[in-house]
Amino acid sequence: GENVEQHPSTLSVQEGDSAVIKCTYSDSASNYFPWYKQELGKGPQLIIDIRSNVGEKKDQRIAVTLNKTAKHFSLHITETQPEDSAVYFCAARDYGNNRLAFGKGNQVVVIP
Amino acid sequence: DGGITQSPKYLFRKEGQNVTLSCEQNLNHDAMYWYRQDPGQGLRLIYYSQIVNDFQKGDIAEGYSVSREKKESFPLTVTSAQKNPTAFYLCASSIRDRFVQAYGYTFGSGTRLTVV
């Protein structure tokens, strides 16, 4: 099945700087890659997703890039703000069982 | 507004007791999932269901049971056989598409279960 890995596990950035989280996946047949944000004590919320026929997608301060050849995708957050502090999960669709395989999550801390 | 509702938000269980966590969705999603999250850990799949009256074990099903009698509901029972049940439990749902298109999951707000 699909295996998704996230790096780094914790990321601290100064407010206003950019944050980048990278995920790698193992199954070249995977075709859907969502990112979730989880605030403390809450459920994960979908913030952006990308399909395999697209290389990049932007939504205001967040963007996701996909490199199918290298089998990795990244979340980019620009002009970080304290409210961006959260755990971010990446996922990839496991084509074999049609479920999402999740990474272990990244703790992002934005320092005011 | 459509959404997915988990209840209760906090639940306390005595050792040896079974407890049931509720998950209800009005998104008309076919598939529903239960995950367990421990502090600083990722999401571990307990059970999932892709259609009414059918469900499959995930990676950590031992000590848990589920039912899917209605499309909208997927309750999780934590039995006394689960030796370390204290955790944050998340329910999710999604469109079930057999073809190329894939969709993300919608998560509930979670239930925090504590054994006392």
Image: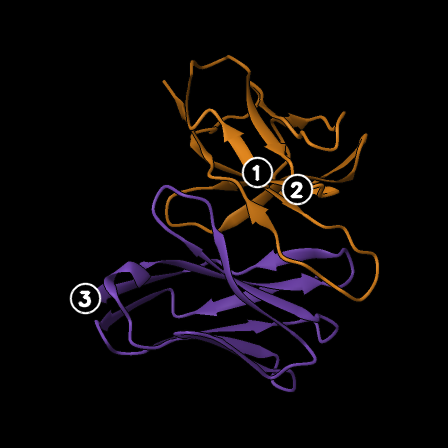
Chain colours: A purple, B orange
Disc 3: which residue: A111
Query: Which chain letter goes with mark 1?
Result: B
Which residue corresponds to the image point at 25% horizontal and 72% vertical from the top-left? A13
Query: Which residue is rendered at x = 67% and y = 59% of the image?
Result: B103
Q: Is residue A40 left or right of residue B78?
A: left
Can you say whether A8 is above or below B112 in the image?
below
Residue B116, located in which quarter of the rendered image? top left
| Rendering quarter of residue A85 | bottom left
Q: Determine contact: label 1, label 2, CB under 8 Å.
A: yes
Secondary structure under tag 3 reads: strand
Name the chain under label 2.
B
Q: Amino acid at mark 1?
A: Ile
Q: Could you tell me if residue B99 is visible in this image?
A: yes
Asked if the residue under mark 3 is in contact with the one under mark 2, i.e. CB atoms within 8 Å, the reply is no
Q: Chain of mark 3?
A: A
Q: Which residue is mark 1?
A: B4
Give me the residue at 57% from left, 21% from top.
Answer: B81
The answer to whether dots 2 and 3 both sit on one chain is: no
Q: Quadrant of the C terminus of chain A?
A: bottom left
Relative to residue B4, is residue A81 depicted above or below?
below
Q: Nearer the viewer, residue A30 or A60?
A: A60
Q: Label 1 vs label 3: CA separation? A: 33 Å
Mark 2 — residue? B27
